[in-house]
Image (spheres, rainbow, N blue to C red):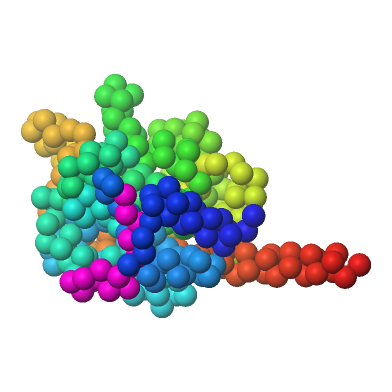
């Protein structure tokens, strides 16, 4: 089954399961289709739905980077710019969030701004939180894990984020391990990121991903990137050098039905890299302060990123924005290459069937 057929099948199954009625919304959201249930609904923007149905390139984008990753208005401007970059590179952006209990796949500009203004007042939603937020009609930004789930539901194969979560430092004692890692082990989607956030324990994170059976590749390097820095000092298990190679990797994973995710780490552009003692010192200070203040769990990563930004005089936020945009370029190019590969395969299949019928 081709990815295009798979996407159509997923959307059809969702509609059948949820007793879907397709409609345009009021209040500035015309063009969105809603998948209604008696207790809630899933909303897919018309752009995303049309692209998936026609086998076009779509890139999923998470929303905790908007709500918890940076302050307003930088978060809103960055979200709009990242979506524009995805479009410029041949794909349709699908920012994912939950608004008023409705999982949304593809947001309007108004919805993006609403999330941006909510900021940390919005809930940070991972897999464990989805049912609760939907049931209580809450709103929030989806983490890597939750975004993967919703993207995979509708057949989106490529997802761009800044950096994934991982094993926290001292995680062998606290067992503080991001659900991003277990989700990568059970949800077949390609995540394009600047590696693992450098506030985390990168060697242990890579070990955990290996245990989960996740294919981890670095882009144009054999050194796995470390978010703010180009290199972590950890050797990447695999290396891919072009969007086409990345797309073939995704397609091979799909055809083999391995049912696990793929992580592609692309180094932050050199001119935006924050390296050496500056970032290391800031991270150590932030970690110590978080421990002293008793900040743990889902609140820790947003605190650490914010504090590191303060300690680096804003340079880490600039780097964060730059790396997300860089990731979006590659992610869109991968999605476009994947769509082309799958379209070519579909044409070959049609040709083979036609020849068989003629004979």
Residue 323 showing in the rendered view: no
Left or right of 273, for residue 134: left
**Position of residue 316 measured from the top left corner of the image (x, y, whole percent):** 22, 57
Q: Main secondary structure of the magenta part?
A: loop
Q: In the displayed structure, does residue 222 sit left or right of residue 309?
A: right
From the viewer's perspective, is residue 196 above or below residue 273? above
**What residue is rendered at 44% in x and 33% in y?**
208
**In the rendering, at what x and y percent does residue 120 appear?**
13, 50
Q: Residue at x 15, y 63 (%)?
A: 114
Q: Residue at x 34, y 46 (%)?
A: 146
Q: Is residue 181 left or right of residue 104?
A: right
Q: Residue at the location (26% across, 45% down)?
A: 39
Q: 176 or 26, which is in the foreground? A: 26
- Along the viewing direction, whichever of 19 and 203 lies nearer the viewer: 19
Camera-nearest residue between 85 and 103 = 103
Quadrant of the drawing holding the C terminus:
bottom right
* Residue closest to the far bottom: 88
User: Magenta stretch containing residue 244, yes or no?
Assistant: no
In the image, which residues are magenta?
24-37
User: Where does the N terminus fall, quadrant-wise?
Assistant: bottom right
Residue 285 in the image: above or below residue 349:
above
The quadrant where residue 6 appears = bottom right
**Residue 193 relative to residue 296: left or right:** right
- Give the percent coordinates (x, y) of residue 291: 14, 31
Residue 306 in the image: state x and y as whole percent: 15, 51
């Amino acid at each position: 089954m081709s990815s295009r057929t798979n996407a159509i099948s997923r959307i059809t199954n969702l509609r059948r399961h949820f007793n879907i009625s397709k409609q345009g919304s009021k209040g500035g959201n015309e063009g969105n289709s809603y998948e209604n249930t008696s207790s809630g609904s899933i909303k897919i923007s018309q752009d995303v739905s049309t692209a998936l149905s026609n086998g076009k390139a779509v890139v999923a984008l998470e929303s905790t980077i908007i709500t918890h990753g940076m302050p307003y208005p930088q978060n809103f401007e960055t979200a709009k710019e990242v979506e524009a970059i995805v479009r410029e590179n041949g794909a349709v952006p699908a920012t994912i969030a939950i608004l008023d209990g409705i999982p949304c796949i593809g947001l309007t500009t108004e919805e993006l701004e609403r999330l941006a203004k909510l900021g940390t007042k919005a809930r940070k939603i991972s897999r464990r939180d989805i049912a609760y937020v939907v049931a209580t009609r809450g709103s929030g930004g989806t983490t890597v894990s939750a975004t993967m789930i919703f993207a995979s539901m509708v057949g989106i194969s490529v997802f761009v984020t800044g950096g994934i979560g991982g094993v926290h430092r001292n995680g062998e004692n606290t067992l503080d391990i991001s659900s991003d890692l277990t989700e990568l082990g059970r949800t077949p989607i390609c995540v394009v990121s600047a590696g693992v956030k450098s506030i985390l324990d990168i060697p242990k994170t890579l070990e955990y991903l290996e245990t989960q059976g996740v294919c981890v590749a670095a882009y144009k390097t054999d050194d796995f990137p470390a978010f703010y820095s180009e290199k972590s000092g950890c050797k990447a298990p695999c290396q891919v050098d072009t969007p086409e190679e990345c797309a073939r990797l995704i397609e091979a994973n799909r055809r083999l039905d391995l049912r696990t995710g793929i992580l592609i780490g692309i180094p932050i552009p050199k001119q935006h890299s924050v390296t050496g003692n500056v970032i290391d010192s800031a991270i150590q200070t932030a970690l110590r302060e978080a421990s002293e203040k008793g900040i743990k769990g889902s609140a820790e990563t947003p605190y650490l990123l914010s504090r590191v930004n303060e300690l680096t005089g804003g340079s880490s936020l600039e780097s964060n924005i730059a790396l997300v945009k860089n990731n979006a370029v590659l992610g869109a190019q991968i999605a476009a290459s994947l769509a082309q590969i799958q379209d070519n395969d579909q044409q070959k299949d049609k040709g083979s069937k036609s020849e068989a019928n003629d004979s």
